[in-house]
Amino acid sequence: MAINVTRPFVPAIEKYTELLEGIFSRQLLTNNGPLVTQLEAQLKEWLEVDRVSYVANGTIALQMAMRALELKGDVITTPFSFVATTSSIVWEGCRPVMADIDPHTLNIDPEQIRRAITRDTTGILATHVYGNPCDVDAIEEIANEYGLKVIYDAAHAFGTTVNGRSIFSYGDIAATSFHATKLFHTVEGGAVFARDPIVHDLLIAMRNFGIVGDQITCVGINGKNSEFHAAMGIANLASIDEILASRKALSERYDERLEGTGLRRPLIHPDCQYNHAYYPVIFDSEATLLRVRDALQREEVFPRRYFYPSLSTLDYVDQQYTPVANDIACRVLALPLYFGLPYEDLDRIARIVARECMPRAVSIAKILRPQPAIVDVPFMSTPSANGVDPTVTGTGLQSA
Ligand SMILES: *Cc1c(COP(=O)(O)O)cnc(C)c1O
């Protein structure tokens, strides 16, 4: 059977049908019904956040966030994200200004944000790439200094905490996605988390056409989600600890199995509890990536080039110079990672990756005299001691 980069978690069907029976008996299908309210309450408790508004999807969450904070003109953002991050800025009539990423964390580089600020800048839209927190403290400092609003695209970040707090509590608004491909999902869905209670109230009005009670209080949209989607969320949330634990175990097994290949991995924020939302690996070159991908595809394994291409290359974005993101986007591949991925399959995937990305001579030498290929660079890569960045120089394949 084919193995894809991800496979949605599904709860025991009885758990879902039990909730469906309630929906059928109430015949209240949408418009902020009891299951939406219940899901919001449970999310608040599990995430330990003060406010949450459940919406139709992650993209509308981003768009509502920009509206609620009245962003205009230029919005500084990352070229290394899913296309919805950039397209929602353009959709809202703003201009995305790309700030390049840090080559180690793959998140937007605060220094590049600083350099991109002009008098037209009103906000920053940054993505916690693969669930790994941005440098939230540095970004907050810059935003305060220049009076900018901060929105986080936290679509990957469910369950991650930083400095002991939910990642969703950072920024003026954090927007997340509960799409079926995400770690926690409600089939389709998303949420906005606002720091300011007034902004939260505005978001609640906005998702319901601007209607509050019998008044129309602002320009709104239909950002609501249904009882059926909320039911899936409630059923899935019951398994969230198990989902997180299994992803961690699978990721650690990949780490072990790929040790010695010299493959680079994003540097995870030092003060966070990471959710293991994805398992990306960075190759020394696009040629190696394509060779590995083709070898995996021959075995019915379908990793994903994620994120690819760099969003700086979109034809509806002004040309911007982001060499790090453009380079990484060509060399990064997300390997299959999901609840229920059998260890045998993971081992097989890791074997193919290791085989294809190591030069023949090294593989043979390893068979004859097993020893790690890496001598001085730890697998969970940190900048090398001599200050040479293997990402930038393209010598990421660290072989003995
Ligand atoms: C999935 C995703 C989105 C969009 O979320 P939807 O719920 O599919 O609209 C936006 N940004 C990032 C980084 C994503 O991964």
Image (tube, grey):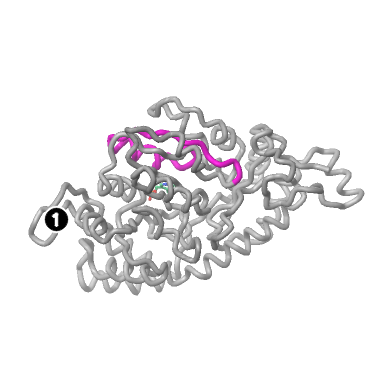
Q: Nearer the viewer, residue 249 or 266?
A: 266
Point out the stretch of residues depicted in magenta. 79-104
Q: Is residue 117 above or below residue 221?
A: above
Q: Is residue 82 left or right of residue 358?
A: left
Could you tell me if residue 398 is visible in this image? Answer: yes
From the top left corner, tell me how far across and down residue 289 is, in percent: 65, 37
Q: Nearer the viewer, residue 72 or 227?
A: 72
Q: Is residue 102 magenta?
A: yes
Give the residue drawn at x 52%, y 51%: 130
Question: Could you tell me residue 105's position as x and y percent?
Answer: 57, 47
Total marks shown come to 1
Q: Which residue is mark 1?
A: 211
Q: Position of residue 292 (x, y in %)?
A: 67, 40
* Quarter of the picture holding the C terminus: top right
Q: Specify the farthest residue to the right.
A: 368
Name the residue rendered at 40%, 69% in the picture. Answer: 48
Q: What type is the residue that disc 1 sits on?
A: Ile
In the rendered image, residue 326 lying in the magenta stretch gets the answer: no
Helix, strand, or loop for circle 1?
Answer: strand
Residue 1 visible: no
